[in-house]
Structure formats: structure tokens, C-alpha cells
Amino acid sequence: ATEAPDLDFWEKACPSDSTFSLLETVKMTDMSGVPHEMEFIKFLLRNSPMLETMSITPSVYVTDGRLNMLIELVRFRRASAQAEIIFIQD
């Protein structure tokens, strides 16, 4: 399921005036790095001005794509200058 025809779903479903103004911590587990997951992460980072920590644990089945996922994650813009991305590799 790597095809993602509707990647702007989050922008359509949550108008720009509905930010996550109180969101401080996000923990995501079993992430594969597929386009819909990455767009959701990008959406959260872009719309969470109080975000402090986003912890992401990749799926145990993702081995080759981990570095690419990490590189893409650190490139995303953040609404919070304090937002830290923690990429957990077990």
C-alpha cells in the first residue's frame, strides 16, 4: 500500500484554523514510512505550536528504509522551535 492518491487528506479534513495548540507530546509506534504516515507526521509538526517531543519507533519490518525515513523526518518544518524528534531504533 505505497500508493497514496490523497496525500492532502489532513489539510482537507482539518482546516488551517484548527491547530493542535495544546499538543506537547506525540508517541508513534510501528511506523513504516509510507506516504500517508509521513504526511500525517508532517501535518502534526506543521500545526502543533506547543509540541515538545515527537517519539517515532519504526516497524520491526522496516529495515532498509529507516535511514530514508529519518532523513525525511528531520526535513519537515515545525510550528514549534522546541519540537524534538526522537527516532527510536531497537
Image: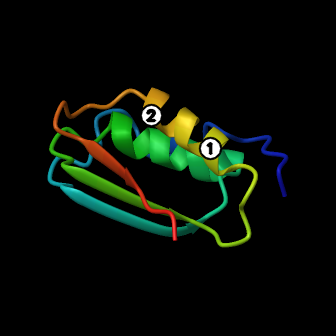
Front one among 61 and 41 = 61
Name the disc covering residue 67, or none. Answer: 1
x and y percent of residue 1 in the render? 84, 58
x and y percent of residue 51 in the render? 21, 47
Total marks drawn? 2
* Eye-nearest disc, 1 or 2: 1
x and y percent of residue 28 in the render? 45, 65
Which quadrant of the figure has residue 72?
Answer: top right
On screen, residue 34 versus residue 45, left or right, reads right
Front one among 22 and 76 = 76
Tag 2's secondary structure? helix
Q: Is residue 39 visible?
A: yes
Residue that lies at the very extreme toward the front in this rendered image: 90
Residue type, mark 2 in image: Val
The crowding category of the residue bearing disc 1, from other C-alpha atoms within 10 Å (few below 14, some 14 to 19, many at least 20), is few
**Residue at the (36%, 33%) spot, across then down:** 16
**Residue at the (20%, 34%) spot, across then down:** 80
Q: On the image, numbered disc 2 is attached to which residue?
A: 74
Compared to residue 67, the image places residue 80 above or below, namely above
The CA distance from mark 1 to mark 2 is: 11 Å
Q: Which color mode does the image show?
A: rainbow
The crowding category of the residue bearing disc 2, from other C-alpha atoms within 10 Å (few below 14, some 14 to 19, many at least 20), is few
Residue type, mark 1 in image: Leu
**Residue at the (60%, 53%) spot, across then down:** 37
Dot 1 or dot 2: first in sequence order is 1
Which quadrant of the figure has residue 4?
Answer: top right
x and y percent of residue 69 in the render? 61, 44
Tag 1's secondary structure? helix
